[in-house]
Image (cartoon, helix red, strand yellow):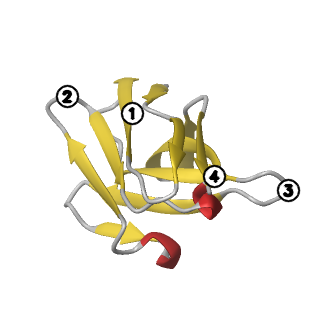
Amino acid sequence: QVRLVESGGGLVQAGGSLRLSCAASGSILSINVMGWYRQAPGKQRELVANIANGGNRNYADSVKGRFTISRDNAKNTVILEMNSLKPEDTAVYYCNALKYYSTGRGDYWGQGTQVTVSS
């Protein structure tokens, strides 16, 4: 099992910045990808950004150039730096850890942290 604890959400004005942090514990050695998803009211959960063990990063088109994901393997932490925030970035942000098994994939989720961007 993997336990994920997020921090850093809050309320910010449009154009501002926030930094989300996710600390992983438990069976972390075989985590393949870590990332952030978000879910706005009435919408499906969507990928924001993720980073693989080799360092490859993937971003949603809507956040490219504004958000940066990084991973500190020594601290078992993944960070999402969010700049130039827009009201449409308002959502609950969830940390995700992905493991690939011979039988399929296993997704682990944090409890979520609210990000609210006011106009």
Which circle marks residue 75 in the picture? 2
Depth check: 100 or 48 in front?
A: 48
The amino acid marked with disc number 2 is Lys
Q: Nearer the viewer, residue 2 or 92?
A: 92
Residue contact at pointers 2 and 4, CB within 8 angstroms: no
Residue matched to label 3: 42
Real-space CA distance between mark 2 and mark 1, rounded to the nearest whole angstrom: 10 Å
Query: Which residue is situated farthest in the left direction here?
Result: 74
Give whichever of discs 4 and 1 has the lower sequence position: 1
On screen, residue 119 versus residue 85, left or right, reads: right
Please tell me the numbered disc located at residue 43: none
Residue 61 location, x and y as percent?
49, 79
Mark 4, mark 3: which one is toward the viewer? 4
The quarter of the picture where residue 92 lies is: top right
Residue beneath label 4, please?
Answer: 90
- Sequence-wise first label, 4 or 3: 3
Q: What's the distance in space between the residues labelled 1 and 3, CA to CA? A: 25 Å
Classify residue 7 by image quadrant: top left
Tag 1: amino acid:
Cys
Give amino acid for label 4.
Thr
State the image quarter where residue 97 is shown.
Answer: top left
Q: Residues within 10 Å of mark 4 (few under 14, many from 20)?
A: many
